Amino acid sequence: MLFGKKAGIKNRNRERYERIRRLMWIKCESCGRLVYYKDYKDNHYICPRCGRAFIMTPKQRFDLLFDNNEWQRVELPIVSDDPLNFVDRKPYKDRLAEARADTGYNDAITTADGVIGGIPSTICVLNGDFMLGSMGRAAGDGIVASIEHAIEQKRPFIMVTCSGGARMQENILSLMQMARTVVAVNKLHASGTPYIVLLTDPTFGGVTASFAMLGDIHIAERGARIGFAGRRVIEQNIREKLPSNFQTAEYLYDHGMVDMVVPRAELKEKLEKILAVLTKRPHTPRAINVATPTTDNKKVRGMGENDAYDKVLLARNENRPHFLDYINGIVDDWTYLAGDRLFGEDPAMCGGIGYWRDIPAVIIGQEKGRTIETRQFHRFGMPNPEGYRKAQRLMRLAEKFKLPLISLFDTAGAFAGSAAEERGQSQAIAESIATGLSIKTPYVAVNVGEGGSGGAIAIGTGDRVLMLENTIYSVIAPESCASILWKDNKYKATAAAAMKLTARDMADLNVIDKIVDEPSGGAHTDWQTTMEMLATSVSEQIRELQKIPTDKLPARRGEKFLAMTRDVEFCAPAHDADDK
């Protein structure tokens, strides 16, 4: 708040008041220190002492996010005031009049058109300074009109929320805005218009429980408090002390509700990258330039028993590239998207959007990690149910924007644990298979390491299924197969040969469409060459699939998998050394 008395400022005095305010100090409500106003403004209205991000006016938001501070306000409907003749300590009409005098805005919603990174866009802002951004009839009508405007103009729609929830002074009329705004959001999704929600501090109540949690992508501003019921209300109800980070942006990220937490100064750049991919802006790819990590070249135990088990060990090689290595080497303008919107973020299943060379795409896959710490963090690439549900969400995102879906699967299997079972591991895998088979967009799945059981096929039902040369695909690990059927783990190589789990075996069984070559020593010996060959192979498959009408893809994909395993007579033909 301002250091000094703010109450009573009238519109006719506003210009003088603003001139004086620029020369004043303000008191940070978070740390209690005095901050020179110019420093505060230059720091995007964030306290330079403690980092607290304060409420921005709609104009400040538009200036921050639109190119060159250039934008035009969108005219919104005007509704009648106080339909219920509501009076608490003072009449609702008086509260409205005070809010209008203090802020210079008619109500809590302001919308403008402008350009973000060269892309014409519409931004709608819930103004936290106007009765704490509460949502009444005027706000509801404004959001609906803004969405309809974005659909008509074919502009991506960015909703910036800052609200305490529904406006009590309008009671049921306010509550109905939750349903009305969701109707508008449904139309937005049906039209294929990008919908990005920027959640700022605070966002609560009926706003979070309606349009604010239905975006294609959710961005939480760092430091934002986001929730349904307030912290004090919850503590009073359950008589428990809540965690210190409860309902923070970071808390919601960990619990799968937002895709990312972004500092205010980086919001524009992040929006530019996201919008470029979702609107399929042309892109010139950078050259692939990756170095192969050094290794001690120690002899791998078990190598040489037979060709099949050698492939098993090559697929598991510690120096082999993993999902995030391929992303860093091949993909431009990568934006990681997090969370299943239901329970949590699963780092074992990674996903996001970016340019696969020059092709805007949605990319998902398991990440195993490389160091002890990262392997534990990514759970060795074995996803929980929320990981598969995140994959389903990204599959549907790809379908909405007709972006190709690329999956790079590499897992020993889905995580086996009591918590995973409690949260529906089998259902999550089944739903991932069903979603992958039904999406109306090109889908290329690549086995880049281990293809372990249902954990792999959950993101392996592509129009084209590829395998790197030294990868494996099986219903169970050969060690486990040997222990169960041979009653002794020492027969693991024998089991591997009997299971026919190599890429060559998969091609002979017509389970895959293509084998992607690796360098002579394996992918782990030459990352540069591996990534160049993979990038080219996937791009070729996508371009072929893009020639097929998207509404025909699910049926063709389904027929492909139905045809697998019919009348199988496995008799591996002789292959020349050069025939991969």
Image (cartoon, helix red, strand yellow):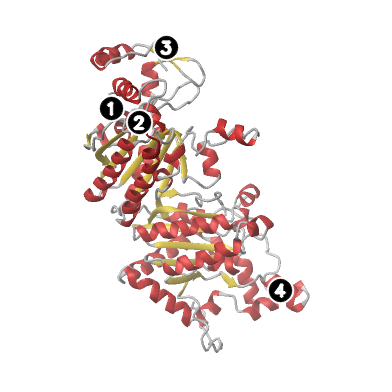
**Image marks 3 and 1: residues in contact by CB distance under 8 Å:** no
Residue to which mark 2 is pinned: 127
State how far apart marks 2 and 4 are (Cα): 64 Å
Task: Say which of marks 3 and 2 sits in front.
Answer: 2
**Image marks 4 and 1: residues in contact by CB distance under 8 Å:** no
Which of the two residues, 304 or 49, is positioned nearer the viewer here? 49
Which of the two residues, 173 or 18, is positioned nearer the viewer here? 173
Label disc, if present, on residue 571 of the rendered structure: none
Q: Earlier in the sequence, mark 3 or mark 4?
A: 3
Residue to which mark 1 is pinned: 105
Q: With 461 as the anchor, is 245 left or right in this view?
A: right
Task: Say which of marks 4 and 1 sits in front.
Answer: 1
Residue 517 visible to an observer of this rendering: no
> How far across and down, in percent of the image, does residue 574 sit?
53, 87
**Image marks 2 and 1: residues in contact by CB distance under 8 Å:** yes
State how far apart marks 2 and 1 are (Cα): 9 Å
Residue 391 visible to an observer of this rendering: yes
Q: With 232 as the anchor, is 179 left or right in this view?
A: left
State how far apart marks 4 and 1 are (Cα): 73 Å
* Tag 1: amino acid: Tyr
Residue to which mark 3 is pinned: 3
* Tag 4: amino acid: Lys
Residue to which mark 4 is pinned: 492
